[in-house]
């Protein structure tokens, strides 16, 4: 069914079930297809849009005041927006924040991303929760000319994220060094001038703030493409290996990532730390399985329990697949669990400094609840006696 439209809609969102939502378009014009998810965070829309883990997805923001603080170059998680589009309740207002350097609408238009405002995001969110993340087509035309049948057909023709290896599309083209640390008042971003540990980070869609946290924990970081081999990783003689966040189906990315991780684990004793897709890659390498979630976890208010300490952390999450805790093999311990739905959020090897988490410990909704994971990684590297 079609929902009531404004007098002259300039954008519409068509779902594969035939539903059409009309609204006001902003950003660039044109059409895109993707999976639709919702994010419950009240801040961080710029970081969300530039998070490579959102490749292949259009984001519905449940918080209505999107665009109110504008955008600025410091808050990008990667060079360009990766999320395919944006759905909001209210059209963005003129930004009011001392750090703002650009209006969200202009930023989206310049970066080639479509957005739609004036949507009943609560109704849309309920539909996503009840039916699962739908395939959609989003169109923006200032003249309001839409071929609804073609848009619904485009939504139905979207292949979906299952079976898609999106890490190849968002990974770096070549290796690079990273030494920028976390932002701090009043200096802003500073450089790591005295690193203690040499880390190779596999880029499955790495966020800049994750790399900054590694640098702040004393790491000299070299980033390698997702397709790097174990030989290429070990050629850098790292003290530890980091597996980054990223988008897509972990089973698809695992076709080349899992053999590399297994070789690292089989031939060395160096610490390994994974986040998000990196968590799923490590789980697959250890013999576990991953599953597609109904609508995933996307937000900055997710309570996660550390099963070994009893501590509950407020975390940021963005994932549509999860590690099946029932498939964890002997010798692999579940360390963290979502208090929303009981899904797995962390694992470790019982006898080695190899561990990973599903949530994003570099984000700060807690605000510092999960930073200890980076410190734990540094401590494991410091404790290791080189062979």
Image (spheres, rainbow, N blue to C red):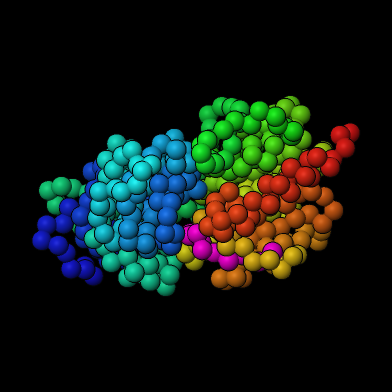
Which quarter of the rendered picture does the N terminus lie within? bottom left
Front one among 222 and 259: 222
Q: Along the horizontal axis of the image, is 300 left or right of 97?
A: right
Task: Place residue 349 in its image quadrant.
Answer: bottom right
Q: Along the horizontal axis of the image, is 274 left or right of 109?
A: right
Front one among 105 and 234: 105
| One can see residue 126 in this view | yes
What stretch of residues is rendered in magenta?
297-306
Query: Is residue 302 part of the magenta span, yes or no?
Result: yes
Q: Along the horizontal axis of the image, is 338 left or right of 40?
A: right
Image x and y of residue 284, in percent:
68, 52
Q: Residue at x 44, y 42 (%)?
A: 75
What kind of secondary structure does the magenta stretch mostly adopt? strand
Image x and y of residue 45, in percent:
40, 51
Q: Residue at x 62, y 63 (%)?
A: 313
Residue 189, compared with residue 25, is above or below; it is: above
Front one among 245 and 379: 379
Image x and y of residue 336, in percent:
68, 63
Which quarter of the rendered picture does the C terminus lie within? top right
> How many discs appear?
0
Q: Residue at x 38, y 42 (%)?
A: 99
Residue 340, compared with residue 174, is above or below; it is: below
Image x and y of residue 221, in percent:
65, 33
Residue 235, compared with residue 26, is above or below; it is: above
Query: Is residue 15 part of the magenta span, yes or no?
Result: no
Q: Residue at x 68, y 47 (%)?
A: 374
| One can see residue 31 in this view | no
């Amino acid at each position: 069914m079609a929902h009531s439209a404004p007098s002259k809609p300039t954008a519409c969102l068509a779902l594969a079930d035939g539903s059409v939502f009309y609204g006001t378009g902003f950003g660039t014009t044109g059409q895109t297809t993707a999976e639709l998810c919702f994010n419950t965070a009240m801040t961080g829309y710029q970081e969300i849009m530039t998070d490579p883990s959102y490749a292949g997805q259009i984001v519905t923001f449940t918080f209505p005041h999107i665009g109110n603080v504008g955008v600025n170059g410091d808050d990008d998680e990667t060079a360009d927006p990766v999320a395919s589009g944006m759905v909001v309740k209210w059209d963005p207002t003129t930004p009011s924040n001392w750090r703002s350097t650009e209006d969200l609408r202009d930023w989206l238009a310049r970066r080639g991303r479509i957005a739609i405002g004036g949507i009943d995001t609560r109704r849309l969110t309920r539909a996503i929760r009840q039916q699962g993340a739908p395939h959609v087509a989003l169109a923006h035309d200032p003249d309001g000319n839409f071929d609804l049948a073609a848009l619904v057909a485009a939504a139905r023709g979207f292949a979906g994220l299952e079976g898609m290896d999106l890490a190849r599309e968002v990974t770096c083209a070549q290796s690079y060094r990273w030494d920028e640390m976390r932002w701090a008042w009043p200096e802003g971003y500073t450089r790591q001038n005295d690193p203690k540990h040499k880390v190779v980070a596999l880029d499955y869609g790495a966020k800049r703030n994750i790399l900054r946290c590694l640098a702040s924990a004393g790491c000299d970081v070299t980033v390698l493409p997702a397709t790097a081999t174990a030989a290429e990783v070990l050629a850098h003689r790292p003290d530890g290996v980091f597996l980054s966040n990223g988008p897509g189906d972990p089973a698809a990315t695992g076709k080349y990532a899992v053999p590399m991780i297994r070789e690292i684990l089989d031939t060395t004793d160096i610490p390994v730390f994974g986040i998000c897709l990196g968590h799923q890659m490590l789980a697959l390498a250890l013999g576990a399985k991953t599953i597609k979630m109904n609508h995933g976890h996307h937000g900055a208010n997710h309570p996660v329990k550390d099963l070994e300490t009893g501590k509950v952390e407020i975390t940021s999450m963005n994932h549509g697949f999860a590690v099946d805790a029932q498939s964890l093999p002997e010798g692999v311990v579940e360390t963290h669990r979502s208090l929303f739905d009981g899904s797995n959020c962390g694992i470790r090897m019982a006898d080695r400094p190899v561990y990973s988490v599903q949530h994003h410990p570099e984000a700060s909704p807690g605000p510092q609840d999960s930073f200890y994971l980076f410190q734990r990684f540094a401590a494991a590297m410091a404790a290791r006696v080189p062979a």
